[in-house]
Structures are given as C-alpha cells and as structure tokens.
Amino acid sequence: WAHFSEIVQKAEPMWLLVAVLLQVGTYVCAAATLQRGIKASGVSWNLFRLIPLGLAKLFVDQVVPTGGLGGTLLVVRALERRGVARGVGTAAVVVNTLAFYAAYALAVGCTLAVLWLRHGISRAILFLLTAFAVYAVAMPVLILWIVYGGRRAHPKWVTRIKPLEKAIRAMEEAPSSTLRHPLLFLESIALQFAIVVLDVATLDVLLRSIGHPAPFQILFTSFVLASIAATLSLLPGGVGSFEAGAVASMRYLGIPLEVALTGTLLLRGLTLWLPMLPGIWFARHEMVGESEAPEKAEPDEVEEPGHRQPAAAKRR
C-alpha cells in the first residue's frame, strides 16, 4: 500500500485525461451498436441520444447480474417511451447481446493464443476459460430459443420471475428479419470488440501515467481473464472478482504486484465507479418516468361532483 500511494501521487494528469477520452469512446461504440440495430429495422435515431441509455443499461447490468436481461428490459422500455416500437428496440438489444458474446469469444481466442505462445495455459486458467465457454454458448442459445423456438410455451418457473418473463415477452416481439441481417451482426461484433480494445487501451494508458508501461498483449490477456472471472462470479459489478483476476493475471504474466494493483484500481474507478453516478441518474429517470406515465392520465378520469362524463371521454 505504501508503493501504491507513492505510485498514484506520481501519476501524470495528461495520461489520465486520455484514459477518460478512451472510456467515452466505449460509450459511443455501445450507442452505435444500438443505433445500427434500430436502423436495420428502418428507424433512424440520433447516436448521442442513445449514450444515456447505454449508461443506464450498464448500471442495471452491474448492480443486478442477470446476464444482461435486466438492462435489456430497461433499454427496450426506454426506446418504447421514445416512440420506437418494442419489437424494433428488442431486436437492436438482442443483436447487441449476441454480438457481445461473440466478441468475447473472439477475445478469448486471442487470449489463448497469447498464453500458449508466452507462458502456457495453467489448469486454473483452462478451467476458467472452459466455464466461460459454456456460459457464453448457453446464453446466446437461450436467447435464440426464446426468439425463434420458444414462442409457443415457456417453463412454469419463468412466469414466477416477473422481470425475466417481461424480458422474454419483449424478445418474442423482435422481428426475425433484423436478427438475420449478416452485415448488422458483423458490425455489432466489431463494435463490441472495439469496446474491449478501448478498455485495454485505457489500462495501458493508466500504466503509462504511473510510469510503468507494459506490452499490450499482456494487458489484453489480463483484462479478458479478469472480465471472465467477474462474469462467472455473478457478483454485482464483479466487485472483488475482477480486481483479483486482473491483479493475479498481470502478476502471472510478469507485471509487478504494486503496478498491477494500482493500474487495476485506477481502471475500475474509470470503468465502474465513475459511470455509476450518471448511470444511477439515467436509470432512475427512465424508471420514474415510466411509473409516472399512467398517473398523468388520472386527472382526466376524475368526475366532478354533479357532472357526468360522456362515455367517449371515459374511453379516451
């Protein structure tokens, strides 16, 4: 901890600014993925208006680890309130989710190549990657089953979990034509992979800011392994599991412990804790806005004493 405080005090502010700009780039890529999915259904939408929805989805997915279903439901409802049909919004989010898993599968392949060429693959890492491979295959299969094969019936336990049931019902309305768009899927994978690269570049810049640069392929491998550990832990935000996985991976690949710890904590500050503040606000804004919508219609339905509303007005 003495080394940690000493290293942080020597951090160069200019590099920290570059790290912030790289993180802004991740939110632009996430919004671009949603925009491309909506546009594939014939609906045009401003890119920068989707960035707040990306922050809100990030907050919900971090706090409530549901494989992205909670954030998916939030984004679909938010788009619906803005005039985008539920099926169109759902198709965009489903493509986004499928591209996320495909991009991480590509990242895992790169990680295996780096480990194989440099240090070999330990049993612990092999077990971690195998478990994630099962998870990364199961989730897309579940989503595709819901969209294509599960429209007729669902298990009874699904109906007992209301958020999950609502997310499934929303996915059923996704137009299959959008989901079968090959170019859209490839673009979404590229954008999701770009988010991973930008996160790794952020870690690279943070290490440069404290005067301890490291090879990019080592940082890429460490970040992917830490992300896998955070995903499999099912902890909110992957708190603890990501930090432990990142520090252990960088230490395993030859980066000093105090440098790995400092870089990891700075990265988490930019990628998790700092976005939490606007994420909470945007998520609350969307949830409160939705809950207030039916209340606005109540004054029109209240009858004044001695006055009887026409039947047409009541139906309105």
Image (cartoon, rainbow, N blue to C red):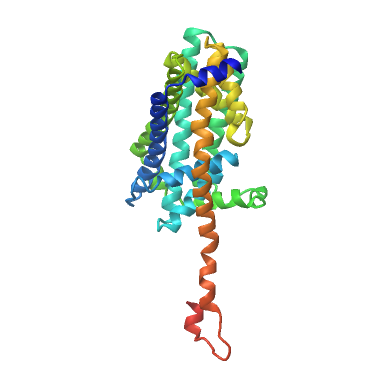
Query: Residue 241 in the image: x percent, y percent?
Result: 61, 27
Q: Is residue 134 left or right of residue 107?
A: right
Query: Residue 92 in the image: x percent, y percent?
Result: 42, 45
The picture quadrant where one finds residue 251 is top right
In front: 89, or 247?
247
Question: Does residue 284 lie above or below 248 as drawn?
Answer: below
Asked whether residue 202 appears in the rendered view, the answer is: yes
Point 43% across, 13% down: residue: 215
* Residue sitting at the far bottom: 306
In front: 77, or 4?
4
Question: Does residue 26 lie above or below 74 as drawn?
Answer: above
Point 40% across, 55% down: residue: 84
Question: Does residue 29 lie above or below 133 as drawn?
Answer: below
Asked whether residue 180 appears in the rendered view, the answer is: no
Query: Residue 154 in the image: x percent, y percent?
Result: 61, 49
Question: Does residue 38 lie above or below 203 as drawn?
Answer: below
Point 67% across, 48% down: residue: 157
Query: Residue 234 in the image: x percent, y percent?
Result: 63, 34
Quadrant of the image containing the N terminus: top right
The picture quadrant where one finds residue 184 is top left
Q: Is residue 302 left or right of residue 13?
A: right
The picture quadrant where one finds residue 22 is top left
The total of numbered circles placed on residues is 0
In front: 242, or 111?
242
